[in-house]
Image (cartoon, helix red, strand yellow):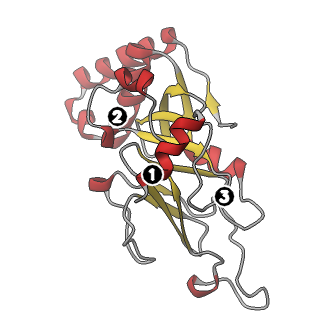
């Protein structure tokens, strides 16, 4: 599975954290700005933990669609059994744990939904002779099974599973277990820290198949 990794060193992260703290000392109002919070999350996390960072949005865009017109990648809350992808005609998509999500629903922070921006994808049409619209998106809402985190990696989880996401390549959008997921901690809407990567064993894939019931 190929993802868009970003290069960052501990030295740079440390320097940026110090600069952010200095900026707030000079202007306390900056602490309420989203730009400040996003940068502090990214640089602060990397400065403390190191590791790799990935651009989730760019990874989806580069991976593109499969032959069926569905995303090659999926992302969902780590405690979910199934992942649902709701497509939108502007090329955006919402990945959620909620099977009741409809076309007009907005992404919900309470569910840790992941929303991809407009123009991320170019959806295929049901009817190629008609304009693309909500009613003419092929496979408008799709689902697949979410990988489990192996027992050997569970010590990495310091909070509830719902605070983490799993990112993986979908072989086919159907009840078929994946093989090579990545455990992420989302820091901003599009940037995430990689906590672990692994290949699922046949036994773990069998456990995933049973979780859909």
Rounded to the nearest whole Å, what is the CA distance between mark 3 and mark 1? 18 Å
| Left or right, 85 with reference to 187 | right
| Left or right, 34 with reference to 124 | left
Q: Which residue is mark 1?
A: 210
Numbered label tally: 3
**SS for callout 1:** helix
Image quadrant where residue 104 sits: bottom left
The reply to whether residue 190 is in sight is: no
Query: Which dot marks residue 36?
Result: 2
Task: Give me the residue at 38% from left, 36% from top.
Answer: 38
Question: What is the quadrant of the C terminus in the image?
Answer: bottom left
**SS for callout 3:** loop
61 up-or-down from 1: above or below: below
Question: Which one is in front in this view, the residue at disc 2 or the one at disc 3?
Answer: 3
Label 1: how many residues lie within 10 Å, few (<14), some (14-19) or many (20+)? few
- Mark before the other along the chain sequence, 2 or 3: 2
Image quadrant where residue 175 sits: bottom right
């Amino acid at each position: 599975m190929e993802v868009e990794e970003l290069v960052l060193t501990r030295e740079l992260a440390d320097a940026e954290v110090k600069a952010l703290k200095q900026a707030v000392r000079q202007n306390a109002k900056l602490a309420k700005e989203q730009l400040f919070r996003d940068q502090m999350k990214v640089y602060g996390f990397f400065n403390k933990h190191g590791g790799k960072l990935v651009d989730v949005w760019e990874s989806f865009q580069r991976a593109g669609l499969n032959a069926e017109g569905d995303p090659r990648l999926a992302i969902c809350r780590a405690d979910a059994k199934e992942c649902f992808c709701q497509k939108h005609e502007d090329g955006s998509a919402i990945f959620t744990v909620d099977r009741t999500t409809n076309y007009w629903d907005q992404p919900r922070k309470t569910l840790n939904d992941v929303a991809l921006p407009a123009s991320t994808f170019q959806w295929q049409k049901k009817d190629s002779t008609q304009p693309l619209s909500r009613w003419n998106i092929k496979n408008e809402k799709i689902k697949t099974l979410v990988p489990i985190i192996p027992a050997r990696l569970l010590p990495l989880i310091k909070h509830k599973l719902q605070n983490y996401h799993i990112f993986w390549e979908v072989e086919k959008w159907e009840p078929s277990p994946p093989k090579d997921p990545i455990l992420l901690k989302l820091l901003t809407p599009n940037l995430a820290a990689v906590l672990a990567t692994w290949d699922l064993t046949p036994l773990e894939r069998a456990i995933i198949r049973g979780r859909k019931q």
